[in-house]
Image (spheres, rainbow, N blue to C red):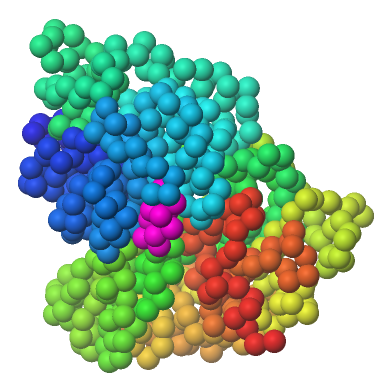
């Protein structure tokens, strides 16, 4: 297996707009690789796309176990004629399963409708990939029965009628064309999601012809010839080594015997574009507006003071991104998805928003929170280390670890530039054709348009209220004190001149559960050594409250700094901020319809940990709004006593 080609190709694909890849999966080649080859291929892709989705093609429970051990997120089940339901059930005990309808000439099985319904009814089956080669009628049949399984994903494998497959219900694409022409496929999907149908029609005009023209002739249907690996983007055909073009069905040979296909994700546009008004341009509202626009909606985003403003819960310079959440698995998995989306948008927007310097969790006495997190981190595919107290002290001598018994180091965690990210999301929305208005809105009245502070009204088909600490004031009866703002103080201290020990090159973000939860961020793009107390402060008015730090909070921060970082005992204060948390009673998010208005969604309760989840939450809310689905019970208003 050509290791240099594999490494070059994984690096190349990591720079493109893919939500993830499928390995061991191309037209049955995966089962023909040895176990060692499969392990090396999966390891290379996991390293290149550490927080992206990786799907592994499997033919047995043993292969599914290999995929799970190697860090795959899901499995693509190669068709099996013998008791396919039991086969998929067994695979699902290892990882979430994507069923695979593959045309028979390539070794597939023509599952009938009762079998497909039975497969899609399995809880572990999250969707189905359909690759018929050229049978539009078969794809139409399967797309039709998917209406009975609205929570399952239809993935197109049709590069000969990719555009049409999207129009009849495919919500993602997993095809060979994307391995060679990722930018073309990405542009086609983006034009469809964004409602640019003229561009969509132009690009979807026989994509197979475009690929053949660029890469070489299509092999005969049903044949899977092996080609010798060359270099990424160039491989010769069997028995014709002089030809330097890549046949469309064999591009993966440049990645060592067929390693990966890009997985692109998108939402299904509604039959008519709804106009969605999103109130609040913070992390929750901004990302929701962006994903609604990409999902085909007309979107107007409004905010009283602007994205990332000084009063906003999403304002300020930096926010931590971490996946350790004790026993709360929903947030671990959401953080993993969010991290992949932050990386994707950094590439898309060519802006640095994420500083992946790691997160260090220091454990002294009570370690129940961290112990509960370990299996969930492993399950979610997070890269982390468990360090003893001695190992922690040796690695970070600038930290006083005298009482530290052990630690978790999240390798992919770090911090985000908050205010800059909010501005980038707005720019992305405007570039996608969304609208923005800087106005305040008054508490809405049933059946009426929103009344704005400039005297105008704003009417939409659907409304999303992501108003942070103001959500309870807009909806006093439904939300009220279920979202409560608390005063939180943040301090930035100056480090000794030229001392590199307290920069982000030498220290990760840290989280400290010693007495109560303290955390901090080194560096902060040279703004100072950030220290903050996560304990909920007193009630705070986010509109009229004076944002002047208190002497008591500063004294507490200095005492902590002197204990945990002795060399900074006398460090000067260089900056301070007063922000707020918008807390729900159980610190779970609120994502639900207004109980008296089916076209109004309430989104909030970030509770001091919401910012990092912005892109994943926005993606989720957009799916709920456009897909008419039901939110997770953990986020619904019904969890609160009436």
Q: Residue at x 43, y 69 (%)?
A: 330
Q: Quadrant of residue 384?
A: bottom left
Q: Quadrant of residue 453?
A: bottom right
Residue 542 appears at what percent x and percent y?
Answer: 69, 74
Q: Is residue 169 positioned above or below 221 on the image?
A: below
Is-magenta flag for residue 108? no
Q: Is residue 59 left or right of residue 518?
A: left
Q: Residue at x 62, y 40 (%)?
A: 269
In front: 27, or 587?
Answer: 27
Please identify the quadrant where the C terminus is shown.
bottom right
Q: Is residue 72 positioned above or below 231 on the image?
A: below
Q: Is residue 56 left or right of residue 35?
A: right
Q: Quadrant of residue 21?
A: top left
Q: Residue at x 56, y 35 (%)?
A: 168
Question: Quick check: can you spot residue 263?
Answer: no
Q: Is residue 599 left or right of residue 171?
A: right
Is-magenta flag for residue 122? yes
Q: Is residue 298 positioned above or below 184 on the image?
A: below
Please provide the residue range marked out in magenta: 116-127
Q: Residue at x 16, y 79 (%)?
A: 388
Residue 22 appears at what percent x and percent y?
Answer: 29, 42
Q: Is residue 371 left or right of residue 423?
A: left
Residue 369 appears at what percent x and percent y?
Answer: 34, 83
Question: Quick check: can you spot residue 552?
Answer: yes
* Most distant residue in the right direction: 455
Residue 125 appears at what percent x and percent y?
Answer: 38, 56
In front: 508, or 321?
Answer: 321
Counting labels gives 0
Please identify the quadrant where the N terminus is shown.
top left
């Amino acid at each position: 297996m050509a290791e240099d080609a594999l490494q070059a190709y994984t690096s190349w694909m990591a720079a493109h707009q893919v939500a993830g890849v499928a390995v061991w999966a191309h037209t049955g080649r995966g089962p023909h690789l040895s176990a060692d080859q499969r392990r090396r291929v999966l390891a290379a892709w996991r390293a290149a796309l550490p927080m992206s989705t990786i799907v592994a093609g499997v033919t047995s429970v043993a292969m599914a176990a290999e995929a799970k051990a190697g860090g795959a997120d899901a499995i693509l089940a190669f068709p099996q004629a013998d008791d396919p339901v039991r086969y998929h059930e067994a695979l699902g005990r290892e990882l979430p399963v994507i069923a695979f309808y593959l045309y028979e000439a390539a070794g597939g099985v023509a599952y009938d409708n009762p079998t497909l319904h039975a497969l899609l009814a399995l809880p572990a089956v999250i969707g189905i990939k359909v690759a018929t080669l050229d049978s539009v009628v078969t794809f139409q049949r399967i797309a039709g029965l998917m209406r009975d399984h609205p929570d399952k994903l239809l993935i197109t494998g049709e590069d000969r009628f990719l555009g049409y497959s999207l129009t009849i219900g495919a919500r993602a694409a997993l095809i060979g064309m994307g391995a060679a022409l990722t930018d073309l496929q990405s542009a086609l999907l983006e034009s469809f999601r964004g409602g640019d149908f003229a561009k969509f029609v132009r690009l979807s005009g026989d994509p197979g012809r475009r690929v053949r023209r660029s890469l070489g002739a299509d092999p005969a249907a049903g044949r899977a010839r092996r080609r010798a690996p060359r270099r990424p983007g160039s491989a010769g055909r069997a028995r014709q080594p002089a030809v330097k073009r890549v046949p469309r069905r064999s591009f993966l040979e440049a990645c060592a015997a067929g390693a990966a296909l890009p997985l692109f994700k998108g939402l299904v546009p509604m039959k008519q574009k709804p106009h969605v008004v999103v109130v609040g341009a913070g992390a929750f509202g901004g990302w929701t507006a962006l994903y609604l626009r990409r999902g085909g909606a007309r979107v107007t985003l409004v905010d009283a003071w602007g994205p990332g403003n000084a009063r906003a819960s999403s304002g300020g310079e930096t926010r931590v991104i971490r996946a350790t959440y004790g026993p709360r698995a929903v947030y671990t998995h959401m953080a993993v998805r969010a991290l992949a989306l932050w990386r994707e948008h950094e590439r898309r927007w060519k802006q640095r928003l994420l500083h992946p310097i790691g997160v260090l969790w220091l454990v002294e006495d009570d370690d129940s929170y961290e112990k509960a997190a370990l299996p969930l981190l492993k399950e979610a595919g997070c890269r982390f280390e468990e360090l003893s107290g001695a190992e922690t002290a040796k690695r970070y001598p600038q930290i006083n670890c005298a009482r530290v018994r052990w630690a978790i180091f999240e390798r992919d965690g770090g911090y985000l530039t908050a205010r800059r990210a909010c501005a980038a999301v707005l720019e992305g929305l405007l570039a996608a054709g969304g609208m923005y208005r800087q106005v305040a809105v008054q508490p809405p009245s049933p059946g009426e348009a929103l009344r704005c502070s400039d005297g105008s009204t704003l009417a939409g088909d659907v409304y999303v209220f992501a108003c942070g600490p103001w959500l309870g004031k807009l909806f006093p009866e439904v939300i009220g004190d279920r979202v409560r703002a608390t005063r939180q103080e943040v301090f930035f201290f100056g480090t000794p001149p030229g001392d590199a020990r307290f920069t982000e090159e030498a220290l990760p973000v840290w989280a400290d559960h010693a007495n109560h939860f303290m955390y901090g961020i080194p560096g902060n793009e040279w703004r100072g050594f950030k220290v903050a107390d996560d304990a909920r402060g007193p009630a705070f008015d986010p509109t009229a409250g004076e944002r002047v730090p208190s002497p008591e909070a500063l004294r507490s921060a200095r005492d902590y700094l002197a204990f945990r970082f002795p060399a900074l005992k006398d460090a000067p204060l260089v900056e301070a901020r007063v922000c707020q948390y918008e807390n729900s009673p159980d610190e779970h998010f609120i994502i639900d319809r207004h109980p008296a208005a089916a076209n109004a969604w309430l989104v909030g309760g970030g509770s001091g940990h919401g910012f990092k989840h912005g892109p994943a939450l926005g993606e989720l809310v957009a799916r709920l709004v456009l897909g008419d689905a039901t939110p997770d019970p953990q986020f619904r208003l019904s969890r609160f006593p009436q």
